[in-house]
């Protein structure tokens, strides 16, 4: 059983689903949840002398956004589950490693994609990093795929060049 669960949250739909899964696991095992988020750092170019004022404002805005993400996540945890929060100013990878090293966690739960998916495609995803570096079990959760409306699904099937009976309905990607 997993009783002490660390959940990485960033406000993305993937992390919201990860939190839902962590809540279910914690409930099943009479566990507790620790929520972790990191304050995104302003880009390096923002530290230039011309952009220093904007960087300070941007840094404040990023910190406020991280706190809001954390508040929304805490509100989603049912009152009967113990919850602790960690807001880090470290990059998320090092924040995860520090939290895992300093806590007594049985499981790390996180979304498969965060809010910075473009950066992840260049730098490598945080979830991939966690799978390869965190010394505890890691549960990676995908957001639910949006289901097309019935009318849209009918259109997609109708657009197929093969009759649906051949190999089941052939769905044409939108």
Image: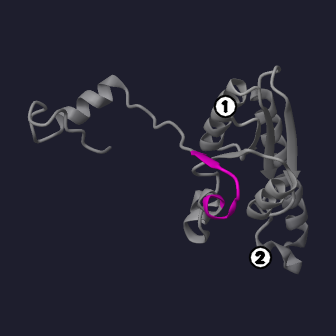
Q: Name the residue under label 2.
A: 45
Q: In which quarter of the image is residue 101?
A: bottom right
Q: Which mark is residue 25?
A: 1
Q: Which of 107 and 54 is in front in this view?
A: 107
x, y percent for residue 86: 87, 47
Instruction: Pick out the residue farthest to the bottom.
Output: 49
User: Against 95, is 49 above or below?
Assistant: below
Q: What element carries label 1?
A: helix
Q: Position of residue 168 (x, y in %)?
A: 17, 33
Quadrant of the rendered structure where residue 163 is? Answer: top left
The earlier-in-sequence mark between 2 and 1 is: 1
Which quadrant of the figure contains the N terminus? top right
Q: Quadrant of residue 102?
A: bottom right
Instruction: Single out the residue that lies furthest toward the front.
Output: 1
> Which residue is rendered at x = 77% and y = 30% of the image?
31
Q: Which of 97 and 116 is in front in this view?
A: 97
At a point 46% along the width and 38% down the height, the residue shown is 145
Residue 173: image tag:
none
Tell which tag, 2 or 1, sits nearer the viewer. 1
Q: What stretch is highlighted in magenta?
A: 130-140
The scheme the figure's colours follow is one colour
Is residue 94 toward the left or the right of residue 145 in the image?
Answer: right
Image quarter of the C terminus = top left
Residue 61: image x %, image y %? 85, 53
Q: Residue at x 60, y 61 (%)?
A: 125
């Amino acid at each position: 059983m997993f009783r002490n669960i660390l959940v990485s949250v960033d406000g993305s739909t993937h992390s919201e689903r990860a939190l839902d899964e962590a809540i279910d696991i914690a409930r099943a095992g009479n566990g507790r949840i620790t929520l972790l988020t990191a304050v995104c750092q302003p880009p390096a170019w923002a530290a230039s002398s011309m952009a220093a004022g904007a960087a300070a404002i941007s840094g404040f805005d990023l910190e406020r956004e991280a706190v809001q993400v954390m508040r929304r996540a805490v509100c989603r945890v049912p009152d009967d589950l113990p919850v602790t929060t960690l807001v880090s100013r470290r990059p998320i990878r090092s924040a995860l490693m520090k939290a895992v090293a300093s806590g007594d966690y049985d499981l790390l739960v996180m979304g498969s994609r965060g809010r910075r998916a473009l950066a992840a495609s260049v730098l490598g995803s945080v979830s991939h990093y966690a799978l390869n570096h965190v010394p505890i079990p890691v549960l990676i959760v995908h957001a639910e795929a949006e289901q097309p409306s019935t009318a849209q699904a009918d259109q997609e099937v109708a657009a197929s060049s093969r009759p649906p009976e051949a190999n089941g309905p052939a769905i044409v990607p939108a």
